[in-house]
Image: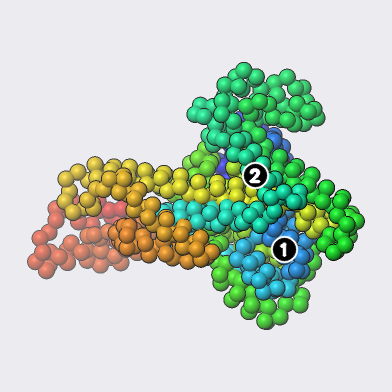
């Protein structure tokens, strides 16, 4: 949930100011603004009239809600539904409150950030709760303690220290390993099904997979937006058929909402909303399953009922000291490394790589969180659990796998998660008593394909990020060598791009292998760090970073007057230069000698620096 402070970049295509200006410039004479919730606004106007800002953001979300956004919003269901249904079935969480607060988190996240940032269960806590049959109190205690620790890490900016310790090749390895784990889990779900003896079978999964592989092929160069999935030859067909893929209507449709069949169905060669197709297939099979089930074993709670389930319950009223202890040591301790690495560092790097047009211009070009910062993401995860877990929410976080899955199925804006959040809220309010039955009837073959797609996209992005980081590091190293010239001993011997790629690939591969084999992201990250120190340039990078930080600290303290530059005497005493002259040292030229006046707070002299 995006409670964190900070701005979010709006689309490069249509920035909008609070005053309606297309250039986001605001009224003359107002203060210099910034961006808020994806909208360029003057700061003072945003503070005075948040209702206007909310209306502007709502209109922007409505204009962005296309078929592709709706399709992409369903990309994370393969992770959400199985864990949520399993926890609700053993009464570790109540389904209606868990769905309701997950939906509220989606809505706030979508309004704050203009990217499809997912909200998904914390997998480590969910796995332990399922294995040990935790009660609701222990799950709530685990969520609150985990949220509190992540919140502290974000507020104190310790997440930046963790990001410095974890190099980019280890982050790529984490993405590759987690992607392989998600994809393998979906494939194993399908492998456990029969071939043809029931509707939910391997053949259905094979048909869905073939459909996704065909319709999610990348657009040829020059054929559309960067990374937009489409059929091969889409640009050629679009030129022949006309129409705009980014709007609800084609060029000959007079309606704004989708009120005619030609609006809803994609035209030939346009990106297909594969997520909608998979959801409709799953819903159709679920309806047939519920309609034809004799329910003699009592698997389904039939007939379906409207309302009847509270959307908020007080979950910590009966929490004991044993629940807090169990939730912290068995839930929070193994979850913290996974959350910091995959739900904060990795997801920010993934958003930075997927949406270069949304990078904030005020961020350093060397950082990899210019779209969504690590600090605001960790604060968002912390507040999400601190506020909602006491009222029945399951422990939630953001995740790179969910973002990758939603992006792969077509989501590009926050409108997708707002739509998903509204659907969750409506489902929990109107069908809260029967939501478990509806979700439990969705075929495992369809969910397995969704999960495999999310894993594939995350792993592919990890490989892409690895290559891109190597190219960037090689360019920086070449520029540094050219700038240094013939200064001896200042830089390490230059290495080729092939050798840099080889080293980074080994580190990323070690990280991914350990992550997949052990099933623990923290073990994979630790193994990758050790490999980076031994096989890569870890020790050299750490030494250079230490020197840079010390230099920054000296400059900062020098500006504050607590650590004066060379030759300046603090507190009005004799200057370092004068003291050196008295001791027989060679004096520098007179124009470098600075003395501090006893009656002034600034440094005086020809070369002095005012704080």
User: Which labelled disc corresponds to residue 206?
Assistant: 2
Q: Position of residue 376 (x, y in %)?
A: 56, 55
Which residue shows up at 65% across the image and 66% down it?
126
Secondary structure under tag 1 reads helix
Q: In front here: 286 or 79?
A: 286
Which residue shows up at 53% across the image and 54% down it?
180
Image: 326 above or below 130: below
Q: Are marks 2 and 1 in contact (CB under 8 Å)?
A: no
User: In 3D space, how far apart are the residues under numbered discs 2 and 1 (Cα atoms)?
Assistant: 25 Å
In the rendered image, which quarter is residue 603 located in? bottom left
Q: In front here: 475 or 500?
A: 500
Which residue shows up at 56% across the image and 42% down it?
9
Q: In front here: 50 or 208?
A: 208
Q: N-terminal of the two: label 2 or label 1?
A: 1
Q: Which residue is mark 1?
A: 86
Which residue shows up at 72% across the image and 65% down it?
87
In the rendered image, which quarter is residue 557 located in? bottom left
Q: Residues within 10 Å of mark 1 (few under 14, many from 20)?
A: some
Res 346 seen here: no
């Amino acid at each position: 949930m995006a409670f964190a402070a900070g701005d979010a970049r709006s689309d490069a295509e249509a920035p909008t100011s609070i005053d309606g200006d297309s250039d986001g410039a605001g009224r003359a004479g107002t203060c210099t603004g910034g961006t808020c919730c994806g909208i360029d606004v003057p700061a003072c106007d945003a503070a005075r009239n948040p209702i206007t800002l909310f209306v502007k953001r709502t209109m922007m979300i409505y204009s962005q809600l296309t078929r592709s956004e709706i399709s992409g919003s369903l990309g994370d269901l393969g992770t959400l539904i199985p864990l949520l249904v399993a926890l609700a079935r053993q009464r570790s969480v109540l389904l209606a409150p868990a769905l309701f607060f997950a939906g509220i988190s989606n809505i706030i996240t979508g309004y704050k950030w203009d990217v499809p940032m997912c909200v998904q269960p914390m997998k480590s806590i969910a796995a332990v709760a399922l294995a040990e049959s935790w009660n609701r109190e222990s799950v709530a205690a685990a969520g609150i303690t985990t949220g509190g620790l992540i919140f502290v890490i974000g507020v104190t900016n310790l997440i930046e220290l963790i990001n410095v310790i974890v190099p980019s090749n280890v982050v790529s390895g984490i993405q590759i390993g987690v992607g392989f784990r998600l994809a393998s889990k979906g494939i194993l779900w399908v492998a456990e099904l029969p071939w043809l003896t029931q509707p939910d079978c391997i053949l259905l999964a094979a048909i869905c997979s073939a459909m996704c592989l065909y319709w999610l092929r990348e657009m040829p160069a020059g054929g559309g937006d960067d990374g937009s999935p489409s059929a091969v030859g889409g640009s050629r067909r679009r030129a022949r058929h006309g129409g705009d893929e980014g709007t609800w209507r084609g060029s000959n449709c007079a309606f704004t909402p989708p009120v005619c069949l030609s609006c809803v169905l994609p035209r030939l060669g346009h990106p297909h909303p594969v997520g909608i197709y998979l959801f409709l297939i799953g819903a159709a099979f679920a309806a047939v399953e519920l309609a034809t089930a004799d329910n003699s074993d009592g698997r389904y709670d039939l007939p379906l009922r409207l309302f009847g389930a509270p959307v908020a319950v007080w979950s910590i009223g009966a929490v004991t000291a044993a629940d807090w202890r169990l939730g912290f040591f068995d839930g929070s301790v193994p979850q913290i490394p996974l959350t910091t690495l995959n739900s904060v560092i990795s997801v920010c790097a993934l958003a930075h790589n997927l949406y270069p047009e949304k990078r904030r211009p005020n961020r350093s070009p060397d950082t990899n969180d210019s779209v969504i910062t690590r600090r605001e993401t960790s604060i968002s995860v912390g507040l999400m659990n601190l506020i909602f877990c006491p009222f029945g929410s399951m422990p939630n976080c953001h995740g790179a796998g969910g973002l990758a899955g939603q992006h792969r199925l077509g989501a590009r804006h926050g409108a997708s998660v707002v739509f998903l959040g509204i659907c969750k809220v409506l489902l929990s309010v109107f069908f809260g008593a029967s939501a478990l039955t509806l979700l439990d009837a969705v075929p495992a073959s369809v969910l397995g394909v969704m999960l495999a797609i999310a894993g594939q996209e995350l792993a592919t992005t990890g490989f892409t990020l690895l290559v891109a980081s190597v190219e960037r590091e090689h360019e920086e190293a070449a520029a540094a060598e050219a700038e240094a010239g013939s200064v001896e001993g200042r830089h390490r011997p230059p290495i080729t791009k092939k050798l840099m790629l080889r080293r980074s690939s080994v580190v990323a591969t070690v990280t991914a292998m350990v992550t997949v084999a052990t099933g623990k992201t923290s073990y994979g990250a630790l193994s990758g760090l050790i490999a980076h120190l031994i096989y890569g340039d870890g020790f050299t990078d750490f030494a250079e970073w230490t020197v840079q930080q010390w230099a920054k600290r000296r400059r900062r303290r020098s500006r504050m007057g607590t650590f004066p530059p060379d030759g300046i005497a603090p507190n009005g005493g004799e200057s370092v230069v004068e003291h050196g002259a008295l001791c027989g040292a060679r004096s520098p030229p007179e124009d470098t000698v600075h003395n501090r006046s006893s009656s002034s707070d600034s440094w005086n002299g020809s070369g002095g620096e005012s704080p």
